[in-house]
Image (spheres, rainbow, N blue to C red):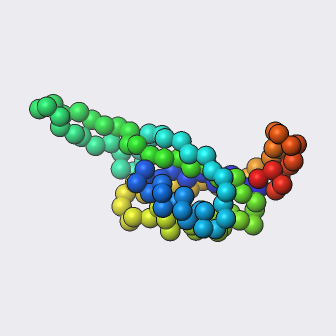
Amino acid sequence: MKLITTIIQPSKLDQVQDALSEIGIQGMTITEVKGFGRQYGHTEQELSQMSRIDFRPKIKVEILVSNYQADEVINAILNASYSGQVGDGKIYVANIEQVIRTRTGETDDEAV
């Protein structure tokens, strides 16, 4: 099993969700997060005051998939979230040892 976590621009959420639905991904967890990478923060002016914004709004999407689905999911996320601009995001892939569906006791692929 793989846990695929991606950090994307908020404006790309619908496109990523649609791309994952098209390849049969039925479940995901979405979290609103803040952070920065290479783009760091930026400076904004409001009411004649300059203020530094260190964290940018992002969306974290977590998807648990079978090993054989991982590459297809990664490609779907890459294609849907790409803008070519700094801040497009990251994708992390982690191995998961076991998954258990609480309600039924099903494990691993059957639990997804």
Question: Is residue 71 shown left or right of residue 106?
Answer: left
Q: Is residue 104 visible?
A: yes
The residue sitting at 48% across, 47% down in the picture is: 59
Q: Is residue 86 above or below residue 76?
A: above
The residue sitting at 60% across, 67% down in the picture is: 22
Question: Is residue 36 shown left or right of residue 21?
Answer: left
Quarter of the figure with the N terminus: bottom right
Q: Residue furthest left?
A: 48
Question: Is residue 68 shown left or right of residue 6?
Answer: right
The residue sitting at 88% across, 43% down in the picture is: 105
- Residue 63 at what x, y percent from top left? 65, 53
- Residue 89 at what x, y percent from top left? 47, 54
How many numbered circles does the render carry? 0
Q: Is residue 64 above or below residue 32?
A: below
The residue sitting at 54% across, 62% down in the picture is: 18
Q: Is residue 74 visible?
A: no
- Residue 73 at what x, y percent from top left? 63, 64
Picture quadrant where residue 72 is located: bottom right
- Residue 47 at what x, y percent from top left? 13, 31
Q: Nearer the viewer, residue 20 or 64?
A: 20
